[in-house]
Amino acid sequence: MKTLLKITASMTGSNGYSAQLAEEFAQNWLLDNPGGRIVTRDLFAEPVPHLTAERFQAFATPASERTPAQEDIVAYSDVLIAELNGANVIVFAVPMYNFSVPSTLRAYFDHIARAGVTFRYNAEGPKGLVEGKQAYVFIARGGVYPAVSDTQTPYLRQFLSFIGITDVQFVYAEGLALGEEAREKSLASARQAVAKFATVRKAA
């Protein structure tokens, strides 16, 4: 059974523009994959704890030496990683907050970046272990950010590549706070991109 993991980080939940685009993509994907399933992780409704020294130490402690509290921390991370590894396609709904990704998404990343589990180091440097995945990132922004001032895309691309996910497509809905006309034009363009993904899959 094919699985799509949808990760949303909007404080407005399913009403967020990034979440709406991600859901539209997911439903198109489901039409193309009868019998497939969608797993949703809403990082605003169920936030991942921010990384602390205690949590980091739990990840770094050998399994045979962990305390019960550390085992609980690692078990929580293991669930997130199992979701990731179990998905064929991963979809991220990412609003821009204060020129960056939501802190809830960063906390999620902190819990899935585990040495020896999702990445390892060798003589050539880091090697991502989460391979063979396709990722789609839907970004919603109030303003317009050309590449020179885009802090989100390089960060997301680098992190996903670090854990082994290199097949990543980005869709942007920008200028959403610049008036109704600008908002509707940008959303229409983003939805066209979503529809184009479905067309490409059918043609493949």
Image (cartoon, rainbow, N blue to C red):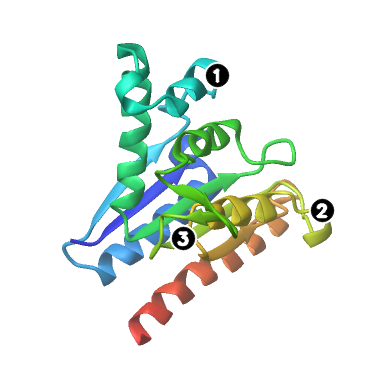
Asked which secondary structure carries label 3, the reply is strand
Residue to which mark 2 is pinned: 149
Left or right, 173 with reference to 169: right
Residue in the picture at 83% in, 58% down = 148
**Of circles 2 and 1, which is in front?**
1
- Disc 2 + disc 1, Cβ < 8 Å: no
Assign the N terminus to one quadrant of the image: bottom left
Under circle 1, the secondary element is loop
Q: Residue 127 or 36: which is nearer the viewer?
A: 127
Residue at 75 percent of width and 53 percent of height? 150
Q: Nearer the viewer, residue 115 or 184?
A: 115
Q: Which residue is mark 1?
A: 52
Q: Amino acid at mark 1?
A: Thr
- Which amino acid, mark 2? Ser
Percent across and percent down for residue 112 are: 45, 39
- Which of the 4 image quarters holds residue 59? top left
What's the CA distance linking mark 2 and mark 3? Answer: 23 Å
- Identify the image quadrant of residue 42: top left
**In the rendering, at what x and y percent does residue 85 appear?**
33, 51
